[in-house]
Image: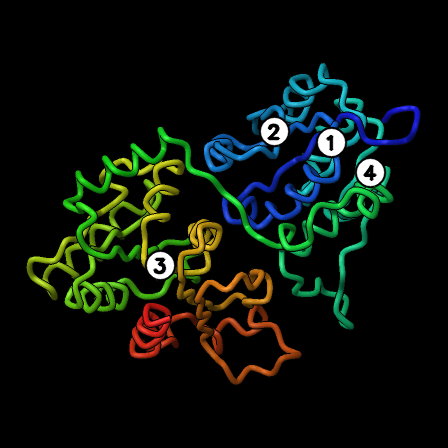
């Protein structure tokens, strides 16, 4: 930090998951607005730099992953030469805190979790329930709280406009937009009809709504004149193919593109999602990409609690469907995996929700 105690060179250690990085963008905007003269670097896992391409949050992106015993040391050596005076950890892991300590960054701000408190100079205590478990704080607010802790008095003096702090933000570069156009055309989608993006995957199998129900909704949307893009990671290629095949059987002649088979990338996915009229999705990263571009969404939750990923209300039509709407507010869905199984969400409820956001 400078002689005045101001942050001059800030390293932001970004979350590890795609959706979490998007939910951190209000915090990144707050930092950029509050520190107009500072050099801000971002430490990102490979691929997540593509997610933030086109934004102005960082002056430099360090793309690295601290894997293995020597991983933190290797990553630290890559950022040490930038002379950062402050590190803000938007991660919760011990290894990322160790990176900032080995990089000799004098001020290290983050949540006191994962046994890493001794590695931090500014410890933020996470909110807990009366039982001592972590409280279901929306991740957008979780990251904003960390950013405010790093800024301290600078937040009060130089904070960015409040309305911008609570908007998710992404951008699409011209190259990414052209890639999106190529992918869609290769899948038989020419932009002549409204586009629905179906996102049936999730890293946790328990968070996946049944594939045949996704296919049924996709077919109904195709029958009402929409083109369908079924998204997924490379590991979800078979799942996307299954849903697309079933949708074509139920709606012969439908334009249904399987994005994983067409080589979709994170950058191209942004361009595809930005073109969509609606997204039907499990609680996973692409849902937040849709939110950043103001695309109406229907999100299916189970068995995780929706309060972890509650998004700011920016006027975009959204419907969040939970497996058990009768669960008491004082209970976490995470603690009731059987009661809150995602397959308890009926197909008719989902189709009605999609039609509702399309009407709005």
The residue to which callout 3 is attached is 279
In contact (CB < 8 Å): disc 3 and disc 2: no
Callouts 2 and 1 close, C-beta under 8 Å: yes
Instruction: Report how far apart the C-alphas of labels 3 and 1 lie in the structure.
Output: 38 Å
Frontmost of labels 4 and 1 is 4
Near mark 1 (Cα within 10 A), the count class, few <14, some 14-19 or many ≥20, is: many
The label nearer to you, 2 versus 4, is 4
Q: Is residue 36 above or below residue 15?
A: above
Q: Which residue is mark 1?
A: 98
Q: Is residue 179 left or right of residue 255?
A: right
Circle 3 SS class? strand
**Along the line of sight, which residue is nearer the eye, 188 or 122?**
188
For the residues labelled 2 and 4, the Cα–Cα distance comes to: 18 Å
Looking at the image, tell me whether mark 3 or mark 1 is earlier in sequence order. 1
Residues marked 4 and 1 touching at CB (< 8 Å): no
Q: Which mark is residue 120?
A: 4
Who's the residue at 53% across and 35% down the image? 55
Circle 1 SS class:
helix
Q: In this rendering, would 329 be left or right of 229?
A: right
Q: Which mark is residue 66?
A: 2
- Give the distance between the C-alpha atoms of the residues marked 2 and 1, in whole angstroms: 10 Å
Q: Mark 4 to mark 3: distance in Å?
A: 40 Å
The alpha-carbon separation of the residues under discs 3 and 2 comes to: 33 Å
Name the N-terminal-most of marks 4 and 1.
1
């Amino acid at each position: 930090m400078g002689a005045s105690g101001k942050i001059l060179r800030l390293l932001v250690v970004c979350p590890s998951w795609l959706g979490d990085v998007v939910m951190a963008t209000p915090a990144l905007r707050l930092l950029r607005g509050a520190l107009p003269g500072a050099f801000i670097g971002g430490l990102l896992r490979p691929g997540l730099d593509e997610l933030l391409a086109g934004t102005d949050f960082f002056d430099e992106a360090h793309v690295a992953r601290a894997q293995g015993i020597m991983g933190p040391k290797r990553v630290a050596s890559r950022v040490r030469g930038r002379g950062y005076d402050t590190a803000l950890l938007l991660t919760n892991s011990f290894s990322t805190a160790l990176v900032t300590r080995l990089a000799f960054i004098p001020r290290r701000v983050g949540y006191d979790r994962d046994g890493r408190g001794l590695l931090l100079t500014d410890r933020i205590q996470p909110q807990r329930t009366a039982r001592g478990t972590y409280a279901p704080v929306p991740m957008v607010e979780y990251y904003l709280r960390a950013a405010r802790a790093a800024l301290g008095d600078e937040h009060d003096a130089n904070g960015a406009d409040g309305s911008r702090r609570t908007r998710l933000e992404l951008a699409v570069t011209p190259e990414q937009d052209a890639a999106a156009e190529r992918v869609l055309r290769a899948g038989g989608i020419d932009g002549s009809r409204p586009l629905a993006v179906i996102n049936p995957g999730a890293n946790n199998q328990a968070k996946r709504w049944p594939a045949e129900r996704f296919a049924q909704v996709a077919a109904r949307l195709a029958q009402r004149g929409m083109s369908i893009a079924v998204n997924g990671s490379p590991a979800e290629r078979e799942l996307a193919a299954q849903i697309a095949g079933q949708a074509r059987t139920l709606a012969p002649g439908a334009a249904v593109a399987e994005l994983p088979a067409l080589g979709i990338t994170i950058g191209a996915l942004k361009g595809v999602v930005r073109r969509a009229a609606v997204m039907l999705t499990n609680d996973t990263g692409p849902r937040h990409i849709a939110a950043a571009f103001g695309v109406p969404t229907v999100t299916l939750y189970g068995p995780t609690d929706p309060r972890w990923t509650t998004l700011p209300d920016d006027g975009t039509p959204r419907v969040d469907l939970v497996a058990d709407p009768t669960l008491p507010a004082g209970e976490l869905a995470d603690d009731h995996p059987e009661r809150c199984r995602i397959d308890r969400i009926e197909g008719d409820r989902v189709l009605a929700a999609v039609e509702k956001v399309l009407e709005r």
